[in-house]
Amino acid sequence: MKTIKTRLFAVLLGMLIPMLTTNCGDKKTADKTETTETAEATAKTESIIQVASPPFQKFVVVTVAEEGLYKEADTNSPTLTKWVESDCESDICEMIYQWSDQPRKSGFEPSTDIIACEGVIFPVLGEEGEFYKVSTINHWCEIESAYIPKTSVGDIEWAPIKVDMLETEDIGFKCRVMKDGKYKDVVFTDEYSELEGETFRVGVLKDGYVATPLTYHMFCNLNNDQKDGIVIDDSEDDITLKFAKSQAMPVEYEDDAFRLDLTKLSDDQIAKIVDTVIKKKPEYVDCMYHFPAQGLQSFTYLSK
């Protein structure tokens, strides 16, 4: 907020008092106006990308080679297991998570992946005796929580995400953060991979983390026949965003591949994208934190 400074030099005492009175009044009016504008801007941002606050504040990191995730605060209780699709011929196979006392699902086989191995971070939901209750929801796992012994983990601190970190550092995906106006703190994220192609997400930078409502899966595709701008198709569960060559940029590590250049999105296009993704209330939210010791990490929680 700008501070109003009034420099008064050699003036008559009779003129000084009314001048100071007037300036104080002007300052109060200006401060009040700016405070109101700030509150309105904040309210607008919150009303655009509506997400429930995450149910965790504390995080722990696994400090042993591997550990079980237990159904109850007891190492004799069932453990969380991961199963992968049998006879999967692609690089992306379906996975399921279930407790070890549940019957094996037909068409799946045990995964060799260790769920809780050294270096894995978990958000803490609570504690019971010598156990932490941690969040276990992810893209594949619908089981909300499990227990892990306190002796197998240590505390890990996170630091607020800064705009420069998202827009300038090599973090594996492209970001654009809106700096002011109606869409202040809205975060556009574009990720490209050989397997899944290009995906686009819209979240909000809030209290040092980026919260993204998972109401959709938006795919991006270059359309060479498209003269200009973007075209959004939200008639299916997955949304498709097609962009013209004029708004494309080359993929650094892949020949003859292009992705959406976030810096070329116009104000109208930004509004169109945001209006599309906020139509439906999210069931889940993705929350990205920055851990100085490990970098950016994302966690999922139910939007209750």
Image: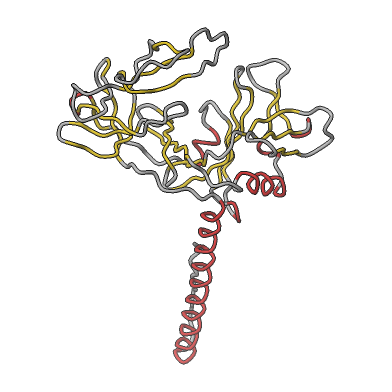
Please name whichever residue, 245 or 194, is drawn nearer the observer in this view of the structure: 194
Please name whichever residue, 285 or 16, is drawn nearer the observer in this view of the structure: 285
Q: Looking at the picture, how far across and down is residue 48, in whole percent?
A: 57, 53
Question: As displayed, is residue 179 above or below residue 126?
Answer: below
Q: Quadrant of residue 120?
A: top left
* Position of residue 281 in the picture relative to residue 147 (left or right): right
Q: Residue furthest left?
A: 129
Residue depicted at x 56% and y 29%: 173
Question: As displayed, is residue 242 above or below residue 91?
Answer: below
Question: As displayed, is residue 2 above or below residue 115?
Answer: below
Residue depicted at x 57% and y 43%: 177
Question: As displayed, is residue 184 above or below residue 70?
Answer: below
Residue depicted at x 35% and y 44%: 55
Q: Quadrant of residue 194?
A: top right
Q: Looking at the picture, how far across and down is residue 147, in whole percent?
A: 25, 29
Please name whichever residue, 130 or 210, is drawn nearer the observer in this view of the structure: 130
* Position of residue 107 in the picture relative to residue 150 (left or right): right
Count of all numbered marks drawn on residues in the image: 0
Q: Looking at the picture, how far across and down is residue 180, in whole percent?
A: 58, 53
Q: Looking at the picture, how far across and down is residue 2, in whole percent?
A: 51, 63
Please name whichever residue, 194 or 143, is drawn nearer the observer in this view of the structure: 143
Residue depicted at x 53% and y 25%: 172
